[in-house]
Amino acid sequence: MTPPPAESVAAMIRPVPRAPDSKVNRDLLAVMEGASLGYWALLGLSVAFVGLAGGIWIYQVYKGLGIAGYIHPVFWGAYIVTFVFWVGIAHAGTLISAILFLFRAKWRNAINRSAEAMTVIAVLTAAQFLGIHVGRIWKSYFILPYPNQRGLWVNFKSPLLWDTFAITTYATTSIVFLYVGLIPDLAIARDRAVGWRKLLYSVLSLGWQGTSRQWKSHNRSVLHLSGLATPLVLSVHSVVSWDFAVSIVPGWHATIFAPYFVAGAIFSGFAMVLTMMIPVRRIYGLEGYITNYHFENMSRFILLTSIIVAYAYGAEYFMAWYSGVESEQTAFYRRAFGPYWISTWTMILCNGVFPQLLWFKKLRTNVPFLFVLSVLINIGMWFERYVIIITGLSSEYDPAAWGIYTPSWYELGIVAGSFAFFAHLFLIFLKIFPVVAIAEVKEIAIHERSHAHAGEH
Amino acid sequence: MPDVLGIWNDPGDVAEAVTRLRGRGYTDLETYSPAPFTEVDDAAIEKPSRVRLFTLIGGLTGVVTGYAMTIWMANDWQIMLGGKPFSSIPPYTIIAFELTILFGGLMTLIGLLVFGRLPSTKIDPAYSARFSAEEFGVRVRCRERDVAEVEALMRGHHAKEVSLVGA
């Protein structure tokens, strides 16, 4: 399919609406206009960190994975921890877009776009860690089932292969979902933009005009994509959890892992949406669209998933004790009281204890509190993966083979770079694409207006 | 043949007008809405979109590809792993599931493009930026002598403006 010649399409649209433009358009498109000094400073800072991390990565490719803190028997370190963390962050977007769409939870309209964008960006961030972790990046294509002269194929019985397929599918489907939702909004932007933006939006909006045929197909597509994405979102982190659970490492080999990881992913994803959207709402004055009601609903999700996660922590300890298996008991004892006790207690406090404050409505509606809590949850969820992966590997069956892993500064630099990577793409997204789904917000606004109008008669 | 364009604020009125216009035989019409309104879209086109066919075909292709690829590859170069059968269905189900979603999703996108007639290089002369604000438009193509009737029908259903496209 060739994209439409943008300039001819743009020329065909009568640019100036005779009636004044709608308030929703003006408010929400304003986010994309101009950029303050603070914006440029943040963008510059995050790009600098991405550059720094890129430099470290090139050095690592040159020197080898020896510069990471790997020490026998821990050969999955901060990179895999961060990979799992970002895949988890990617879960809120699809949950909000797909599952809440199927449940007809209209409140999702204000936050679905930003959450979907975060999903796509987080998956892209996560996917890089597979390349960073393998060290010999030039051989990373070995993971794909491609015809080769050796006649060899990949091992589909390996969870790492399942993961490759799950992440690829999730990235692709999330991008499709985000883009399909964006098309009508891109047409809104196209009708009002000038210069290079008009060209960009004309190409990306594909000549959208909002005809019945287009809306009907669009509605159907969103419904079907939601239907497909709902099991997908549950499967992705299940598959990630099987990277661990299918092995026999004490502390990993548990059937609870899939639901435990999915709940944790939704938990951390919602926290990240809060971390990002609270400042965005404040800076761009979007209080009329993203209200405290939305934040409160998200914090209810956080509370629910926190309880599930806390239950999983408890269940893990119970099963270790109840099983009577010494290696399991030792692994969990060392988690809480061994060399990694700080990580473990950070995880328990941030994910299991602090979120319980959300039982109080006063705190659920206190935006500064939610912001602080969401940051703490992000930290706690990074440590959760650290605890699972590192403590699991560091003390397996034979105490003679135990080892203590500490991430090296190079690894921490790349981990910091991943946060900068996420931030810089989100900042760019803010300025190029509508951060709130305009057409969906309008749908509700017009319905309300019609009902109010009907009430007058 | 002239094109008559009516403009509305309320989706309910648009739906009624479209139903009436089509009932009177003016079937060459197009609606422009700022957001999805099922009442308007269903009045203009009764049948549900056939995007679902594409999703179904994509999903079925995915599940077949997933099993066929994994089973064939495992048997093409047989490697014994822990005495498990080469065609190990449970792990391959994961691949088949992921490909069902992947192909289903991509085919849904293609379905949207096919049935929404996108990408389109032509923008209707009747379309304007008003319809990506908060107004609704209905464009009816009719014979010269029917223009007055179409206008009367539109105004009768609360159209706030009626004009000839290009006039």
Image: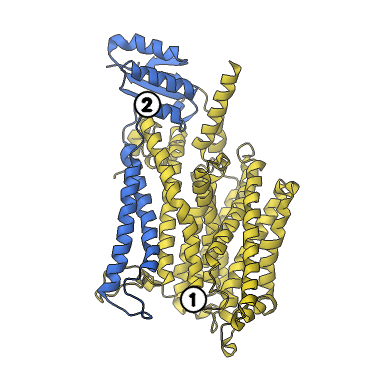
Chain colours: A yellow, B blue
Image point 71% across, 52% down: which residue? A358
Residue lying furthest bottom? A400
Q: Position of residue A54 (x, y in %)?
A: 49, 66
Q: Considering the numbered disc 2 on the image, is that residue within a helix, a strand or a loop?
A: helix
In the image, is A92 to the left or to the right of B124?
Answer: right
In the image, is B115 to the left or to the right of A227?
Answer: left
In the image, residue B142 sits, relative to residue A188, either above or below, namely above
Q: Position of residue B89 (x, y in %)?
A: 36, 67
Q: Are marks 1 and 2 in contact (CB under 8 Å)?
A: no
Point out the image quarter for the C terminus of chain A: top right
- Callout 2 amino acid: Ala
Image point 33% across, 48% down: which residue? B56
Q: Considering the numbered disc 1 on the image, is that residue within a helix, a strand or a loop?
A: loop
- Residue denoted by label 2: B44
Q: Nearer the viewer, residue A37 or A105?
A: A105
Point out the image quarter for the N terminus of chain A: top left
In the image, is A39 to the left or to the right of B93?
Answer: right
What is the spatial separation of the Cα atoms under label 1 and label 2, in whole angstroms?
57 Å
Q: Position of residue B126 (x, y in %)?
A: 36, 23
Q: Badge 2: few (under 14), some or many (20 or more) residues near its Cα, within 10 Å?
A: many
Q: Which mark is residue B121?
A: none
Image point 44% across, 27% down: which residue? B39
- Callout 1 amino acid: Ser
- Residue denoted by label 1: A247
Q: Nearer the viewer, residue A127 or A440?
A: A440
Q: Position of residue A72 (x, y in %)?
A: 54, 84
Q: Badge 1: few (under 14), some or many (20 or more) residues near its Cα, within 10 Å?
A: few
Q: Let me know if residue A340 appears in the view.
A: yes
Q: Quadrant of residue B61?
A: bottom left
In the image, residue A436 sits, relative to residue A170, either above or below, namely above
